[in-house]
Image (tube, rainbow, N blue to C red):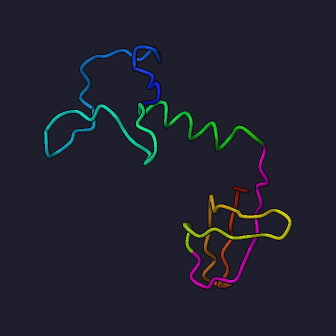
Amino acid sequence: MPDVETTTSLGISSNVSYTNVINTSTNQAVSEITDGVNTDIAEKLYVDQYWNYYNSPKIIMDTDIHNNGYSIFNTFTVGGFGKMLTTGMTLNIKEDTVHITGRQC
């Protein structure tokens, strides 16, 4: 079993909090969260996710496209830049276009 860091080793105090996530079937506070592979502390998973997202420079691109039902959840590919994740979009109903801000994955 892998070594799992505890809340005290991460400097997180154990105290009563009214914002704890509760397992509705047991009515107990959720003490661990899994990402499908590892069971770890939620705060550590959160920091790891953002570290992996921002630790290296990525291309950020603004572009306008014809609106074919584009969704904020779409990803798109740009030649030479690879897969782009949509981080923002603005619809222009008059011109039937979408202004997209994308970040390289």
Quarter of the image that includes the N terminus:
top left
Question: In the displayed structure, does residue 90 sit left or right of residue 18?
Answer: right
Magenta-colored stretch includes residue 10: no
Question: In the displayed structure, does residue 41 sit left or right of residue 91?
Answer: left
Q: Nearer the viewer, residue 67 or 39?
A: 39
Residue most extreme to the front: 1
Quarter of image, res 105: bottom right
Q: In the picture shown, does residue 8 fall above or below 91?
A: above
* Residue at point 37%, 39% (across, down): 33
Residue most extreme to the left: 26
Q: What stretch is highlighted in magenta?
A: 57-70
* Residue at point 46%, 29% (across, down): 2
Question: In the rendering, at what x and y percent does residue 92 appear?
Answer: 64, 77
* Residue at point 62%, 58% (across, down): 87
Quarter of image, res 67: bottom right
Question: In the rendering, at what x and y percent does residue 72 appear?
Answer: 56, 67
Residue most extreme to the right: 80
Q: In the picture shown, does residue 72 fall above or below 21?
A: below
Question: In the rendering, at what x and y percent does residue 48 appear?
Answer: 56, 35
Q: In the picture shown, does residue 12 fall above or below 51?
A: above
